[in-house]
Image: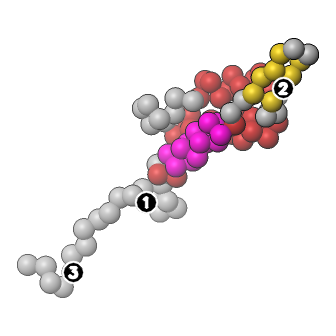
Amino acid sequence: MNIAEIEDDLLENMNFDIPVNVERAERFILAARQWLAIRPESASSQSQSMSLDKQYVNDMLQEAKAIVEANTPTASGANPNVRFLGVGSSFR
């Protein structure tokens, strides 16, 4: 996979939060990790130079991770954010 394909994946999956889409967030995480690992901070060619802000992609990566974690069921199949009312001995 080359950098152009990875960047296409980033752009295709960057709207993982509207509406929340866990599969798209997971694909974004994979592409973002690859992109951050191989993309240079800056590039120059004789009289032209370009600088990229990796922090923006890293921030989106953290947001995608949070969405996946918040929407992934536990081993028992229950969402970890769901709380159930327990009936104790003082219930009337």
Magenta part of the protein: which range? 55-67
- For the point 80% across and 26% down, the residue is 3
Q: Which residue is mark 2?
A: 43
Q: Which residue is mark 3?
A: 88
Q: Looking at the image, is 45 positioned above or below residue 63?
A: above
Give the distance between the C-alpha atoms of the residues marked 3 and 2, in whole angstroms. Answer: 64 Å
Kindly indicate the quadrant of the structure image that contains residue 79. bottom left
Can you name the residue that lies furthest to the top here?
47
- Answer with left or right where residue 1 lies relative to residue 55: right
Kindly indicate the quadrant of the structure image that contains residue 82. bottom left
Query: Residue 1 colored magenta?
Result: no
Q: Is residue 28 visible?
A: yes
Give the distance between the C-alpha atoms of the residues marked 3 and 1, in whole angstroms. Answer: 21 Å
Towards the viewer: 4 or 24:
4
Q: Looking at the image, is 32 positioned above or below residue 89?
A: above
**Element marked by disc 1:** loop
Give the distance between the C-alpha atoms of the residues marked 1 and 2, in whole angstroms. Answer: 44 Å
Give coordinates of residue 49: x percent, y percent: 81, 21
- For the point 52% across and 29% down, the residue is 15
Query: Residue 64 colored magenta?
Result: yes
Kindly indicate the quadrant of the structure image that contains residue 35. top right
Q: Which residue is mark 1?
A: 80
What amino acid type is highlighted by mark number 2?
A: Ala
Give coordinates of residue 66: x percent, y percent: 52, 49
Q: Looking at the image, is 14 positioned above or below residue 34?
A: above
- Answer with left or right where residue 52 lies relative to residue 16: right
**Element marked by disc 2:** strand
